[in-house]
Image (tube, rainbow, N blue to C red):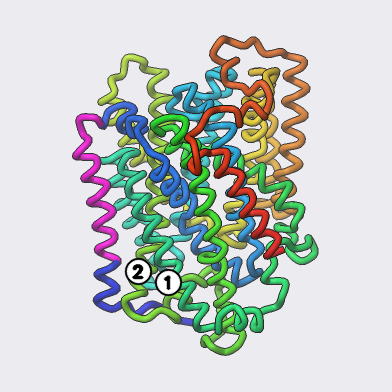
Amino acid sequence: MDFRLNIGLYDLLIVVAYLAAMVFLGCWVGLRQRKKAVGSGYFLASKSLLWPWIGLSLFSTNISTIELVSMAEEGYKRGLVYGNLEWMAALTLIVLALFFAPFYIRSNVSTLPGFLLKRYDNRCRVFEVVIAIFSAIFIHTGFALFAGAKVMEGLFNMPIMTSMTIILLLTGLYTIVGGLKAVVLTDSLATVVLISGSIIMTAIGFHRVGGWEGLTASVEPARLHMLRSAKDVPDMSWYSVFLGYPIIGIWYFCTDQTIVQRVLGAKDVKHAQLGPIFAGFIKILPVFIFVMPGLICYALIRNGALPDKLEDSATTYAYLIAHILPAGLQGVVAAAMLAALMSTLSSALNSIATVFCYDIYKPLRPETSDRTLVRVGRITTLVAMLLAILWAPRIARFESILEGNTMMICYVAPSITAVFLAGVLWKRASAKGAFLTLCAGTAMGAVVFILDFVLGKWNYSFMMTGFWLFVLCSVILVVTSLVYPHKHTRESERLTWANPLEAIRTPGWRGLANYKFLSLLLLAVMALLYIIFD
């Protein structure tokens, strides 16, 4: 079935203009700041980021082509249920703002492995370095590249390797030149384009399907519910969402360098807290503008308003662009897809360079100047780009892009989540206990991944697998910490809450901008949404 987009001149100009704007903005920031673009100025934007840019960048870094392609695919196949991955994220962003951000800023670290060094010891830092670089290349960059290439293939019949190479080179250019400042500003532009393009496509789709009444009349009722049974959706049952998602969500939003780096670059604690909460409010949108279009596509095909049966559900997003958007708007939505792809790639590449420079190269060569460190970071970015291109085509082996991405996170996250959570919430969590937990948890995750992905002999829900791995890791951490007590330094004692309630006693801005008020408001909104779409 051929549904390639016959792109017109105006659409092509929109796409080219967007690509040019992203590259120009990123390079302009880098060249304008080149005297300051050394050390933290390059890797952490001189720790000057304000909450709006942090929130917008958090959102766009998280929403890659994986979400655009896969959320539409899952909406087509299963309805709204995979939207839980978006709405539950709002809760973990609150956890980031309340429990983790204050310590990250207080410890004045450049990387999250550096935080583990100060809270635990050097062994934990080294272990986290490996995990951070692995996840940035193979989870963030690789999956985003492959998902974007699938869309480009569906729209323009462009070979996967060609599209991956072009997009990665363009993104790498401004990331290498501009550093984190360029990444955050281009991410903010990407968020505006992404949300605008997605709203346009959703609105047109709703009009074509006959509004909410037309949609509900065209699909099975179960597809409109967020909470489903294990019999209905084995990997996304209601209890796996509430038990399994917090494990991967805390790893992703609270402990992963690619995501958290813009929080590390915050101007102060208040901006570091408000940025994630702002992102949490924006995370309400994806269910309606990323997942819902896939369900609308299913409804339009089912009632005969769109031709053909969708043979490859991974091309749902491209199919919608080609069939429901008029000339001119096709270019806008194609640009939105590129916005999602490039923002994730730039963030992942910048985080790889930061971790390598501050946690591998600098400790080995302490005398290295900041200018040399930036040069090493740029070379590291080029190497990471090459590895991502080599890995991305192999993602086709997964049953779906989103399932593959979530599966890998579920097997990587449990030990990291246990160690970070215990680190900030339990003073008795020890360095030896944390290191043994990281080793055991990673080994268990690797075994399950081989059984599942390589041998195909693991039939248990990956979300619940992540939860039970976390339980085992927590038991290991508690037991080993009691057997091998931690010897706190004056600094490490400052990086643990005396009790969880202490986190909400830190001062914030007065009035409506207070992080405590906004956190409660976000919780109330999410509870209401789950009541409506239960």
Say whether residue 509 is visible.
Answer: yes
Whether pointer 1 and pointer 2 mark residues with C-beta atoms closer than 8 Å, the reply is yes
Which disc, if any, is residue 332? 2
Q: Label 1: which residue?
A: 200
Count of marks overlaid on the render: 2
Residue 376 in the image: x percent, y percent? 31, 30
Q: Amino acid at mark 1?
A: Ile
Query: As displayed, is residue 130 above or below residue 214?
Result: above
Query: As displayed, is residue 8 above or below residue 347?
Result: below
The local crowd at label 1, few if under 14, some if 14 to 19, many if 20 or more residues have their Cα within 10 Å, is some
State left or right for residue 206 relative to residue 343: right
* Quadrant hosting residue 71: bottom right
- Is 487 included in the stretch rendered in magenta? no
Which disc, if any, is residue 508? none
State left or right for residue 125 relative to residue 84: left
Q: Earlier in the sequence, mark 1 or mark 2?
A: 1
Please report the residue visible at 53 percent of the width from the left and 71 percent of the height from the top.
293
- Is 23 included in the stretch rendered in magenta? yes
Query: As displayed, is residue 512 above or below residue 6?
Result: above
* Quadrant hosting residue 15: bottom left
Please report the residue visible at 60 percent of the width from the left and 72 percent of the height from the top.
76
State the predominant SS element of the stretch in magenta: helix
Q: Which residues are magenta?
A: 15-36
Residue 150 in the image: x percent, y percent? 46, 65
Q: Secondary structure at mark 1?
A: helix
* Quadrant hosting residue 444: top right
